[in-house]
Image (cartoon, rainbow, N blue to C red):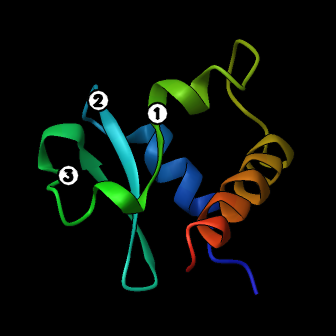
């Protein structure tokens, strides 16, 4: 079972916040502005949008690209102990 999926990655990329951050909270991926990530959740940060964007080529990402990113981010979540 995947903890991070394509839609979670899409929400991060499409966020209106310029400093969007993907956080794993109580079994869900949540996209927050970096300023809203408090001390209790800093250890649950999966990635920032700029880090994820750096992994993508120019242009709109395909579903396959989003799926590949989701697998990588899912591994990060599992490494964090989710």
Please indicate whether residue 8 sits to the left or right of residue 56 in the image.
Answer: left
Helix, strand or loop at disc 2? loop
Marks 2/1: CA–CA distance: 7 Å
Q: How crowded is mark 3: few (under 14 residues within 10 Å), some or many (20 or more)?
A: some
Q: Work out whether mark 2 precedes mark 1 in sequence or the reverse, and give the earlier one.
A: 2
Figure check: 70 above or below 1: above
Q: Which residue is drawn at 72% across and 78% down?
A: 2
Q: In this view, does 59 lie to the left or right of 40?
A: right
Q: Residue 37 carries which label?
A: 3
Q: In this view, does 76 lie to the left or right of 75?
A: left
Estimate the x, y position of residue 20 in percent, counting from the top left. Answer: 33, 38
- Residue at position x 29%, y 54% in the image: 42
User: Where does residue 71 sit, x and y in percent of width and height?
Assistant: 78, 59
Q: Nearer the viewer, residue 58 or 24?
A: 24
Q: Tell me if label 2 and label 3 are in contact, CB under 8 Å.
A: no
| Label total for image | 3
**Which residue is painted at 43% across and 78% down in the image?**
28
Comparing labels 3 and 1, the label whose residue is closer to the camera? 3
- Residue at which label 2 appears: 19
> Disc 1 marks which residue?
49
Q: Is residue 71 left or right of residue 48?
A: right
Q: Is the residue under label 1 in contact with that under label 2 (CB below 8 Å)?
A: yes
């Amino acid at each position: 079972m995947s903890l991070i999926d394509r839609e979670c990655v899409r929400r991060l990329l499409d966020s209106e916040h310029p400093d969007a951050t993907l956080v794993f909270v109580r079994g869900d991926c949540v996209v927050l502005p970096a300023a809203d990530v408090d001390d209790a959740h800093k250890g649950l940060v999966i990635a920032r949008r700029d880090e994820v964007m750096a992994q993508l080529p120019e242009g709109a990402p395909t579903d396959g690209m989003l799926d590949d990113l989701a697998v990588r981010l899912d591994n990060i979540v599992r490494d964090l102990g989710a």
